[in-house]
Image (cartoon, helix red, strand yellow):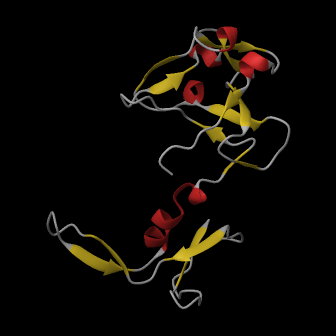
Amino acid sequence: MIAQRRVWRKRALQRPSGRRLDLFAPGSGITSAYHTGDSDTASKNGTSMASPHVDNNGGSLESGDFISLQASNGRYMVAEDGGGSTLEANRTSPGAWETFRIWKIGGSGVIHSGDSIALQSSNGKYVAAENGGGGEVNANRSSIGPWETLKVSFVGW
């Protein structure tokens, strides 16, 4: 859950409900696009103003998180039947078969660019780049080995 804070480090009067806060972000007096015209702006307050400041928590991705992979054509990677065959990028929205669990190899916690990871499909099978790359990509392995180990590169973050 995200809470807004005023620029001078005081908690804002508008607060989300709930017992747990994950982080604070600027949420008071934020200039935002406004619905009255294509180039109109307005100064707004609230947690919806704070959320863009922490989109993906500054790139924080942790071992065990669930992710979806989207190709440059906007289609999502799918492991048909939850895994067991070749992956394709042909879905318009993510569902269970288009969701993968990301595991950090040799540790836990935050995943950084350069870390080795494995992807696990919804039926528990791991994604493998056949022959270590240059061939098909399948979600049909029951354990993690060299072909199931991928390296993370955060691009444009």
Q: Is residue 14 left or right of residue 81?
A: left
Q: Is residue 28 left or right of residue 137?
A: left
Question: Residue at the spot x=51%, y=86% of the render?
Answer: 6
Please state the total of marks drawn on the protein image: 0
Measured as percent of width and height from the top left, residue 137 is found at 60, 14
Residue extending farthest right: 106
For the N terminus, give its image quadrant. bottom right
Closer to the camera, 125 or 71? 71
Measured as percent of width and height from the top left, residue 46 is found at 45, 77
Question: Residue at the spot x=54%, y=91% of the render?
Answer: 8
Measured as percent of width and height from the top left, residue 70 is found at 47, 32
Quadrant for residue 57, please give it: bottom right
Measured as percent of width and height from the top left, residue 62 is found at 71, 47
Q: Is residue 136 left or right of residue 132?
A: left
Residue extending farthest left: 37
Question: Residue at the spot x=58%, y=24% of the render?
Answer: 97
Closer to the camera, 147 or 102? 147
User: Is residue 63 at least partly visible in the picture?
Assistant: yes
Asked if 62 appears above or below 76 in the picture, the reply is below
Closer to the camera, 108 or 124? 108
User: Is residue 125 at least partly visible in the picture?
Assistant: no
Quadrant for residue 141, please give it: top right
Quadrant for residue 71, please give it: top left
